[in-house]
Amino acid sequence: MKKYILKKLALSVVTLLLIIFILFLLMELMPGSPFNNPKLTPEQKEALIRSYGLDKPVLQRYFLYLGNMLKGDFGISYSLSINTPVLTLIRSRLPVSMGIGVSAMLVGSAAGLAIGFLAAFHQGKAADVICMIVSVIGISVPSYIFAIALSYFVGFRWNWLPLLYDFRSPVISSVMPVLSLSVMVMSVIARFTRDEAIAVMKSDYVMFARSQGISNRTLLFHYVIRNSIMQVITVMTLLLVGLLTGSLVTEQIFSIPGIGFLLSSAITVNDYNVVITLSFLYAAIYVVARLFLDILYGIIDPRVRLGGNER
Amino acid sequence: MADKAEIMLEIKGLDISFRSAGEMFHSIRGVNLVLRRGETLAIVGESGSGKSVTMKAAMGILPDNARINAGSILYRPEPGSEPVDLLKASPKWLRDNIRGKSIAMVFQDPMTSLNPTMTIGNQLIAAIRAHEKVSRKEAADRAVTLLEEVGITEPERRMRQYPHEFSGGMRQRIVIAIALSCNPSLLICDEPTTALDVTIQDRILELIVSLQQKRSLSVIYITHNLGVVARVADYVNVMYAGKIIETGTIFDVFYDPRHPYTWGLLSAIPDDASGEELYSIPGTPPVLSKEPAGDAFAPRNPYALEIDFKEEPPMFRVSETHYAATWLLDERAPKVERPKALNDRIEKMKKEAAEYVR
Ligand SMILES: Nc1ncnc2c1ncn2[C@@H]1O[C@H](COP(=O)(O)OP(=O)(O)OP(=O)(O)O)[C@@H](O)[C@H]1O
Ligand SMILES: [Mg+2]
C-alpha cells in the first residue's frame, strides 16, 4: 500500500510540472501582451516587457517561475491590479468560490444519493421514473438557467433573497448560487448511484447472499452500498473539482467575487501570472483529487490494496 | 424402492411469466416435480429451459420482473412437519426459515458468487449470523470449521482474505461452505461445476457427494451435463421450454428413454472413447413470447406426429416411476423405434455400469 501511494504521489508531481510547462507554451502562443493601455507608446511597452523579463526565452522563464513558486512566489499581476501579488488577489476570492462549491456539493450529493438509492430500490416503479425524469432535466439544463430563473423569481419578483452577492451577508447571498449549482450535482449523482446500485443488486453475489437469507440491512450496507459507492465517489470528486474552481457563468450572474470571475477577467487582458497561477491551482486541485481517489480505491477495494490481480 | 421416504418438496403446476422489453415471456409452463427426503434429483435441459427459474421460485429470489401465475411449492422443513406453500409464505418468513436455513443454493459461477469487497471470513460470519444468534467469535470459530470441512487449508489465515485471492475451485468450496453454514436440509446446486476447469469439476462434485452423505442432505442438481447426472442422481427430470417432459429414475431415463428430446440429449453426451462426431439436437428452443401450438418440441422433433403440432401431449405413464410427455406413448401412435446409434450407446452404458459395480 505504501509503495502504491508513493508511486501515485510521484506521478502527481510529474503531472503538475508538465501542466505548468504546457501553460507556459500556450501563453507564449496567445496573441497580445498584458500591456494594452492605449496610452502606452511602443517604446514604453518594450521597456515594460523587458523589465518584467518577458523577453527571455520561454524555457528560462519556466525554470525561473518554478524556482519562485517553490519559494511561494507566484508573481504579480501585470494588468488587472498592477503589481499586486497574484496570491493576494486569489486569497480573498478563493474562499468565496470554495464555500459556494463545497456547499453545492454537499447539498447536491446528499440529495443525489438519497434519490439514487430510492430509485434503485423502486426500480421500474413510479418513484424511479419520477427520480429519473428529474435527473435528466437536471443534467441537460445548464446550471445558469436555474441561476437566472432563481434570481428572477426569488430575487427579483418575490424579493426573498438578495439579487446580487453581498459581502456583508455571505450566507444569505450564497443560497441561490448554491441551489442553482447543486441541481446538476444532484442529478448526476442520482443517476450514477441508481445505475451502480441496480447493477450491484443484480449481481450474482447479491443473489447468493439473498439465497442465504442475509438481512436487508446487511445487504444494503455490506453489499449494495459498499460495492456501488466507489464509482459514486469518483464522480463526486470530479464534480467537486469543477465546483471548487468556481463557476464562470454563475459567478457572473450573481456578481460573486470568486476565482471564476477573476480567471475570466485575467484571460481577456493577458494577465499571464494570474492565468497561470489559477490554471495551476485548478490542475493542482484536480491532481490532488485523483490522488485522493486512488488512495481511496486502495482502501475500499481489496483488489487494489493488496496489489492482487484478477485471475 | 418400496419403502419410500416422505415427500420433502413438491412443485405443482408452477407457472411463471417474465416481463421483458414490454413483452411477456411464458417461461415456466406448468412444472410438476417431487423430491423425497434424502434423495438426489437432477433437472436437465438446454439453456433457457427454465431450470434456474424453477428453483429460484422455491427460494423466493425471483427477479422483480417475474410473475407467478399459478402453482404451489409445498415444502416440509422438518421430517413429519406439515408442508408449507412457499409461494404463499411471506418474504420475511422465507428469509428467516427457508433461505440459507433449510434450503441453500450454490450458483454456477464461483468467480462472481462472492462479495468482492468483503473477506470470506466475514461473508461466512454474515451467513451464520443471518440465522443464529451467536457472537462474532463463535461464528468465526464455526466458519473455520466449515472451511476445513470443504477442504480449505490454513482456514484461520484464509478467513482474512478476499475472494480474488482464491482460485475458481477454491471459491466454489467457499461458496459451498457458506451454503452449508446453517445446516440446511436441502442443497440446490445450480450448475456447480460448469464454470470450472475439467480437472477441478470432479473434485467439487466429489466434495458435494461426500458432504451429502456426511450431512444426510437432499440435493437438487441443475445441469446440462448428463455425465454429472449419471454419477450423482437418483431421479432425473428432463426439462424443455418451461415444462418437465420426462421424469424417472436414472435407470428409467438413461436406459429406457421415451421422449425424443431425451433421446437427443443422450445422443449428445460426448463420448471420449469413440471418435464419433458429436450429435447435437437440430434447431433452437422456442421463444416463449407466444404459446407454442401443440408440443413445444415438435418443430425440432424428427419423430413428430401430426397431433404434436396441434395439441400438447399429457404425461404418459411408462412405469410407476417413469413418465414422459410425448404422443409416441399414446396407444394410437405408430410404433417408433429409438435410433440405433442411441440403442448401441445405451447397451454400452449398461455394460460399463455393470463393470463399474463389479
Ligand atoms: N430476469 C429475467 N428477465 C426476463 N426473462 C428471464 C429472466 N430470467 C429468466 N428469464 C427467462 O426464463 C427462461 C428460463 O431461464 P432460466 O435461467 O431458468 O434457464 P436455465 O434453464 O437455468 O438456463 P441455463 O442453463 O442457461 O442456466 C429464459 O429463457 C428467459 O426467457
Ligand atoms: Mg440456469
Image (cartoon, coloured by chain):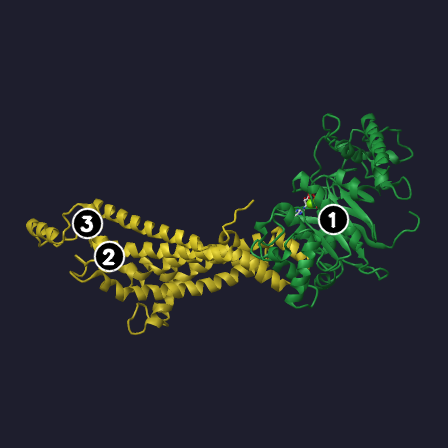
Chain colours: A yellow, B green
Label 2: how many Cα within 10 Å (few below 14, some 14–19, many 20+): few
Give the CA distance from mark 2 to mark 1.
67 Å
Residue A202 % position (x, y):
61, 52
Give the residue at x 53% y 56%.
Answer: A228
> Which disc is residue A61 wearing?
3
Q: Quadrant of ligand 1?
A: top right
In this rendering, position of residue B50 left or right of residue B348: left
Label 1: how many Cα within 10 Å (few below 14, some 14–19, many 20+): many
In this rendering, position of residue B91 left or right of residue A54: right
> Which disc is residue B333 wearing?
none
Q: Is residue B31 visible?
A: yes
Residue B274 % position (x, y):
75, 26
Q: Give B24 or A228, whichever is nearer the viewer.
A: A228
In this rendering, position of residue B346 left or right of residue B130: right
Secondary element at image label 1: helix
Secondary element at image label 3: helix
- Residues at marks 3 and 1, common chain? no
Q: Chain of mark 1?
A: B
- Residues at marks 2 and 1, common chain? no
Nearer to us of marks 3 and 1 is: 1
Q: Chain of mark 2?
A: A
Q: Which residue is mark 1?
A: B208
Give the CA distance from mark 3 to mark 2.
12 Å
Label 3: how many Cα within 10 Å (few below 14, some 14–19, many 20+): some
How many numbered discs sit on the rendered protein? 3
Secondary element at image label 2: helix
Q: Amino acid at mark 1?
A: Ile
Give the residue at x 66% y 68%.
Answer: B135
Q: Amino acid at mark 3?
A: Arg
> Which disc is residue A69 wearing?
2
